[in-house]
Image: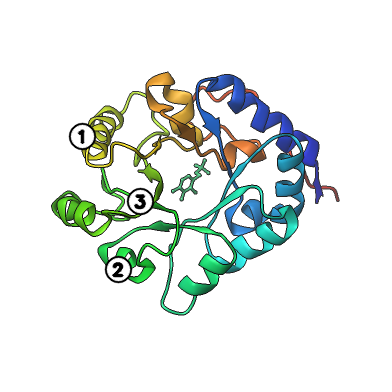
Amino acid sequence: MRVDVGAIVENWRFFKKQAPSAAIAAVVKADAYGLGAVQASRALAQAGARVFFTATYGEALAVRRALGEGPQVFVLNGPAADDAGLMHAAKLTPVLNSLAQIKLWDARGPAALHIDTGMNRLGIGPEELAHASVALKGASLALVMSHLACASSVTHEMNALQRTRFIDAATLFPKAPLSLASTAGALIGADYHFDLIRPGIGLYGSGGLDTGNPALSTVATIEA
Ligand SMILES: *Cc1c(COP(=O)(O)O)cnc(C)c1O
């Protein structure tokens, strides 16, 4: 398989044009969807990307080592008992997905808060929000984020509902930047861009919509 990192950069620039008022992160989890997180991250950082999302501590450390201290590297799975201290030492930014992770992180450093606004069962649920905001008093929130459950269908009613829930929940964290959209969410419209968008699959050439995908650059070519 041939991987064209230049095409990854072109696709990242597509999202930059798509969301001119937002910062454009790069989701490089799962080894950049199998295409090589270190080479993808290096090319994207060179093109100006400053924010990266990985899934695990190990992935985040590899990106941190490749890019040095400047860029912000989020860890989507959040901290576990055996790696919270290591994440802090490597200046990684965990995504806190539960009250247990808020407690475990113990405001060691900046973190993101994941709010569950839909059916994905990941993040702080509505009934836990008040508790979370108290537990996070004095903590530095680098981001408040949520994930759309049905964004591949741009007209799905769930999108607007989650957006409203997200805005309501975010009022508890007035100073934090906000992020709701992954690839498909970024394509729904500017109302979904907030401060930061998080394209993953779009960087690697797939629009993420059920129909009407944009023409992205081809990243992976299989030769036989
Ligand atoms: C994987 C993931 C993304 C990227 O999603 P794509 O559909 O690949 O763009 C964004 N945010 C979160 C929380 C994710 O887990």
Label drawn at residue 103: 2
Q: Residue at x 48, y 34 (%)?
A: 196
Q: Picture coordinates of residue 44 (x, y %)?
A: 71, 40
Which is more N-terminal, label 1 or label 2?
2
**What crowding class fits label 3: few (fewer than 14 Cα within 10 Å), some (14-19), or many (20 or more)?**
many
Could you tell me which secondary element the residue under label 3 belongs to? strand
* Between 200 and 83, the one nearer to me in the picture: 83
Q: Amino acid at mark 3?
A: Leu
Label 2 to label 1, Cα distance in Å? 24 Å
Up-down relation of residue 121 to residue 79 (above or below) = above
Q: Amino acid at mark 2?
A: Lys
- Pointer 3: what residue? 113
Which is more N-terminal, label 1 or label 3?
3
Q: Residue at x 67, y 54 (%)?
A: 69
- Pointer 1: what residue? 168
Label 3 to label 1, Cα distance in Å? 15 Å
**What crowding class fits label 1: few (fewer than 14 Cα within 10 Å), some (14-19), or many (20 or more)?**
few
Camera-side mark, 2 or 1 = 2
Q: Amino acid at mark 1?
A: Asp
Q: Picture coordinates of residue 176 (x, y %)?
A: 36, 40
- Specify whether tag 3 is near ligand 1 (CB below 8 Å): no
Q: In this orientation, does residue 51 appear?
A: yes
Q: Picture coordinates of residue 22 (x, y %)?
A: 50, 27
Q: Picture coordinates of residue 128 (x, y %)?
A: 17, 55
